[in-house]
Image (cartoon, rainbow, N blue to C red):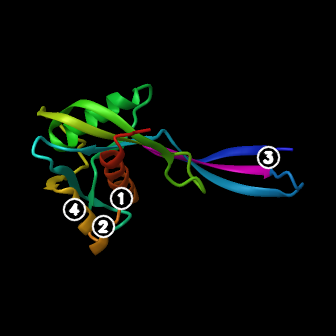
Amino acid sequence: MTNEILSSETVFRGRAFKIQHDLVLRPNGKKTAIDTVYHIGAVAMVPIDGQGYLLFVRQYRHSARKRLLELPAGTLEEGEPVEETAQREMREEVGMAPGRLTKLAEFFLAPGYSTERMHIYLAEDLTPEHLPGDEDEDLEVERMTLDEAFGAIRSGEIEDAKTMLGLFLFREYLETGKSK
C-alpha cells in the first residue's frame, strides 16, 4: 500500500511557490495532514573566472535578516530549460556569460516540506555579458580562491547550504575530473 491523498487544498499561492494542505492516508491506515511547499525549482552556479577565482554574490536575504555570501543562483521560469536559467542568472547576477556549463548535481533542497529541486553547475569560460537583474535584488560580486571559500565556510561567513555543497562538489570535480 502507498500513501493516498484523500483531499488537497491550495492554501497559499505566491510569486515563486504555493503551499498545499493534503490529508493523506498512510500505509498503516492512519490519516495525517501534510503541508507541502510546491516550488518550480532552481539552479546555482559555481563560476570560475580566467584567473581561477570563484565568483560569489552577497545579497540581503530577508528570512535570514542579513546579507549572505552565496553562489549565484535563481529560480527556474515556467518552460525554461535549466541550462538557459543558468545562463540567464549568470548574466543577471555576475554580468558574465558561461561558455561551458558542467552539471555537478541535482537534489531536493528540503524534501521534508518542499518539492524544490536544485541543479548545480560549474560555469567556465566566462565572458563579460550583462543582463539587468531582478528589481528586488541588490547584489555585490565577490571573488575568492577555493581555499578562501572553504575558510569562509569554516569561519561561518558562508552559511548557505547550496553554496557549501556547490563548493564541495567543485573540489571533488577538481580532484576526480568527474561530474554527475
65 vs 36, left or right, is: left
Residue at the disc numbered 2:
153
Asked which secondary structure carries label 4, the reply is helix
| Residue depth check, mark 2 versus mark 4: number of the one nearer the observer | 4
Rendered view: 43 above or below 84: below
Q: Which amino acid does label 3 sit on?
A: Asn
Residue at the disc numbered 3:
3
Residue at the disc numbered 1:
164
Question: Is 92 one of the magenta-colored residues?
Answer: no
Contact, CB < 8 Å: mark 1 with mark 3? no
Asked which secondary structure carries label 2, the reply is helix
Mark 1 vs 4, N-terminal side? 4
Mark 2 vs 3, N-terminal side? 3
Numbered label tally: 4
Q: Is disc 3 surrounded by few (<14), some (14 to 19) or many (20+) residues within 10 Å?
A: few
Contact, CB < 8 Å: mark 2 with mark 1? yes
Contact, CB < 8 Å: mark 2 with mark 4? no
Rendered view: 179 above or below 35: above
9 vs 42, left or right, is: right
Q: Looking at the figure, which quarter contains the N terminus? A: top right
Span of residues in magenta? 14-24
Q: Observer-nearest residue: 77 or 110?
A: 110
Q: Observer-nearest residue: 14 or 127?
A: 127
Residue at the disc numbered 4:
147
| Residue depth check, mark 4 versus mark 3: number of the one nearer the observer | 4
